[in-house]
Structures are given as structure tokens and as C-alpha cells.
Image (cartoon, rainbow, N blue to C red):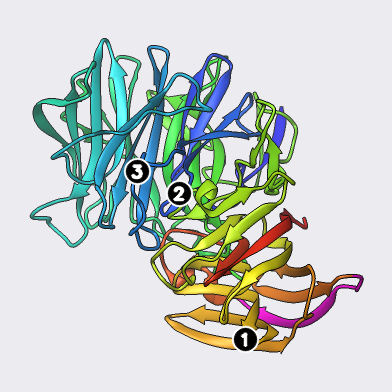
Amino acid sequence: MGRFRNPVLPGCHPDPSVCRVGGEFFLVTSTFEVLPGLPIHRSRNLVDWELVGHAVHRPGQLDLSTVPASGGLFAPTIRHHDGRFHVVCTVVHGEGRQGHFLVTATDAAGPWSDPIWFDGVPGIDPSLTFDEGRAWLCGTRLAEPGAWEGQTEVWLRELDPASFAPIGPEHLLWRGALVGARWAEGPHLFRRDGRWLLLAAEGGTERDHAIVVAYADEITGPYVGDAGNPRLTHRDLGSRAGLVDVGHADLVDDADGRSWAVLLATRLIDGRRSLLGRQTCLVPVEWEAGRPLFAPGVGRVLAEVEADGVPDAAPAPRDAGPLVVDDGRGGVRLGLEWNGVRRLPSEVAAIGPDGAVRIAGGDPPERVGRPAFLGARLPSVRSRVRVRFEVEQAAAGFSAGLLLRHSEDAHLAFVVREDDGARRLAVSLRAGGEEQRLVEASAPALGPIELALEVDGFAVTCSVRAVGGGLEQIGAADVAVLSPDVAGGFLGVWAGVLAVGDGSIRVDALEVSALD
């Protein structure tokens, strides 16, 4: 009997999908406007996960340059078939190409292919199923007309197994388990014990989120809902539950035949609000009379789980790791954990011959544009964010420093600003489209500077260190407005370095780490 802790993938990792190849599991999650997109994690035990690559990782693969906050890459599914990994996903919003697409790779670490688009196929949350030489794509969309506001339906299309072009008629599978239930999402189809199981979520990805199932003799239906739906939910526990928003699951069997579900859940800080957003959790699944029992004997997603087939270990919050790493070919590259917003990290930062990272200024963080931001998921509600850098070029108004980012409309910036020939420190908090200046102070005139943020729930302290000096706290902030429960949207908080305007910086150190 092993014991592990949820979430197994800390930080903002929503909408998990999983598959097994031999003795290894591979998992993908949503990333919205963050690039590289669709991280691929690998594990041998479903508890300890290693980031090995991203399905969207190359210039020209996708255009997310005009995608607003919480647009972009929605709810991927990963499957392995005929020696290749397949990831299907949806691009939502923006001026670039939108809709469902497929990318493939022989190695989960990449390289991944250019997208194959499913033209004329509506909705979101696609899922791919291979069965007896045939390929199928299912997804969700709003029912038109719906019997109630937000009623959603699950559709199915057969695909040509060679070209992946849709063929044949559309099949309507499902319009929700409960009368009045809204926003069916994350559908997956499984053949089990001679019949088909449709796994989906409904109720929206917040407090009413729930996992539901339906059954059919043929993949095309008709599907009959389980009489015990929802099969798993925390909607009846209220905000006092340790984990809320439980839903959006995927199923996988291990090599010994045990079944598991990965799913998303949110941890609240104060019984009302989260900071990290939706995270990936794991529960065992058993089967009784062909029906799935999620977390059998408990019926809840616990923070600490005892189960056979897993190690006796507690997943640690994921530090972002080194900014620059060996690329395995005699050179160096940016670490996989580091992200940009609507830009790849390689488009934001350049590694010089001296090994230092240089960043040229970009758009301000409140604009849907091309910010020069290099950051990582906040790994814990108790975290440290630190940067040591030197301004190399700067025009008037140039600023650089640290950013805690939820969206364009919700972020905390702690920067050094070039202001009429003087350097100033500024801490500002943006919420609901309004910016509040919290701190302004003089900054060291020359040389490298270190800025640090210490996060303890919604309380953040801001400190500065000049060359040869000690760390000096200059201010504090309450960042509850960055919570997805306040600011809205689908992302949690990212943290990293930012440069704005006409100028550039040399980054000597960047840290995003957990204090747990």
C-alpha cells in the first residue's frame, strides 16, 4: 500500500489527459496563451512526473499572438497509437487560425508535427479514439437550440485513419446527465468489457464541476446515463472542502490492470479563493458491474491518498529549475519549465556566449501584445521569486523587474524604472483594469540589482539588494485580486522577469521556487 499527496502535478495544470505506453505514463494539460504550449509530462508511477517537452514548441507551429488572457489552447487529449503520440486540442479566440487540430510525434519529447486542422468541426475539448483500425474524434459544443441556458452536447465524427480528415456523418451522443446541467466538457470514449463508456464533466469548471458517465453498445450510441450520476463531485461539500472544482477526468490502466483517473481540482487558501488555479490530481478507480467507482470507499478526492500500485511518496511542489541548461548536444538552452506569454521563450530571451540571458524590452503587461516576459508557474502558495539583473540599455520610461501574472487585467509588478535620468523602484498592482501604485522608492544608480518577492498565500513582500548589500524589504502587497476566483479566467499565477519599453537587461539569475 502506497501513500501519495494531491495534487500530483502542483501549479496551474488544468484539464489533464493521460495515456500509457508500456511501463510509462504520459500526461498533457491546458496552457491557454502561455508558450511553449501543452506540456508533456512522463511518469512510471503516476505520482512522480517529469516534464519532457511540449506539443507546441516551434515558431510557426501556431499563431497565438493576438490571443487574450484565457484564450488559446483549450483542453488537450493525448493518445498513443501505431508507434506515435497524438495530441488533439482547440485554439480559441484571437485573430489567427482557430478550431481543433492534431499534432503527432514518435517521441513525447518531440519534435512534434505541424498541426493538422479539422476544418468545419465545431466546439471545444476534442478527444481522439482509435478502435479496430478506425479513428474517431469527439468534442463538445453548445446545444442549439438548448433546452436551458448553457446546455451542451457531445458529438462524434469518424476520421480517415491516414489523413485524419472527417468522414461520414456526425453522431450526437449526449446532452448532459442532469436536467439543467451546464457546460459538458472533456469527453473521452473507452471500450470496456464489450461496451462503450463516455466519460465527461459538466456543471462548469468551478464549484459545480462534476464527473459523469454514460454507456452504449456501439461507439455511435445511443448512450444511456449512469443512474448514479454524477460519479464524482465536490459540489456538495462547499468551500470548506480541501479541494474544490473537481472534474475533467481521464482514465488509464496501469500494467497490472489497476485503473486510475487524473482530474483537475483547486485548493482554496481562505475557504473562498485560490492562487495557483486548477491543478492535476489522481484517484484510484475500481469497477463494479461495469460502473466506475472513483476513489472507492471514499468518493472524494483527498489531499492524502492510500492506494495499491503507487509509491509511498509525497510529490513536492515543482521549482522551475535552472534558467539555462545543457541541451545534450554540446550547447545550452532555456529550461523547459520557463514560459512566455503569446511568445516562445526563445523569442523573448537570447543566451549569449558568456552564458548570460539577455532580454530586450517588449509590450507592457496590461496589453494583449508581445510582452518580454520569461516566467514559470507559481509552484506553491508559499513561494520565492527572485531575479538578479543589470540594465544594459535603457531609454526614458524603460522598466524591468519581476511580475506575478494572472492576466493583462490582474498582475503585480515590482520593477526598476528609468525616469528622467534617475532610477526608481516601483511596486504596482493591477486589478479590474485599474492600476494602483503601492510603493515608489529610489533605486541604486549603477550595477546589478536583485529583486525578490516572497509569497505567503495572498501576502507578498517585496525586497531589493544592491551590489554588496543585504536584502532590504521595501513594501508588501495583498494579491488576492490575482485569484482566478476574483479575476476570472482559467489560469493561475505565473511568476518571472519582465522588461518593458526601449531597452535591454542581462539576467544573471532567475528563481521561482517553493518554500514548503
Q: Is residue 439 above or below residue 403?
A: below
Instruction: Identify the residue under disc 2.
Output: 31
Label of residue 62 in the image? 3
What's the residue type where badge 3 is placed? Leu
Residue sitting at 23 percent across and 58 percent down?
Answer: 180
Residue indicated by mark 1? 419
Residue 428 is covered by the magenta coloring: no
Pick whichever of labels 1 and 3 is earlier in the sequence.
Answer: 3
Amino acid residing under circle 2: Thr
Does 409 appear above or below 496?
below
Label 1's element? strand
Is the residue under label 2 in contact with that under label 3 (CB below 8 Å)?
no
Q: Position of residue 133 (x, y in %)?
A: 25, 10
273 up-or-down from 116: above or below = below
| Image position, residue 450 (x, y; %) | 78, 68
Where 241 falls versus 158 (above or below)?
below
- Mark 1 touches mark 3? (CB < 8 Å): no
Residue 70 placement, left or right of 257: left
Counting residues from the start of the chain, the first of labels 2 and 1 encountered is: 2
Circle 1: residue type: Asp
Classify the position of the N terminus by image quarter: top right
Q: Name the element at disc 3.
A: loop
Residue 318 seen anywhere in this rendered image of the structure: no
Q: What segment is highlighted magenta in the picture?
A: 468-479
Foreground: disc 2 or disc 1: 1
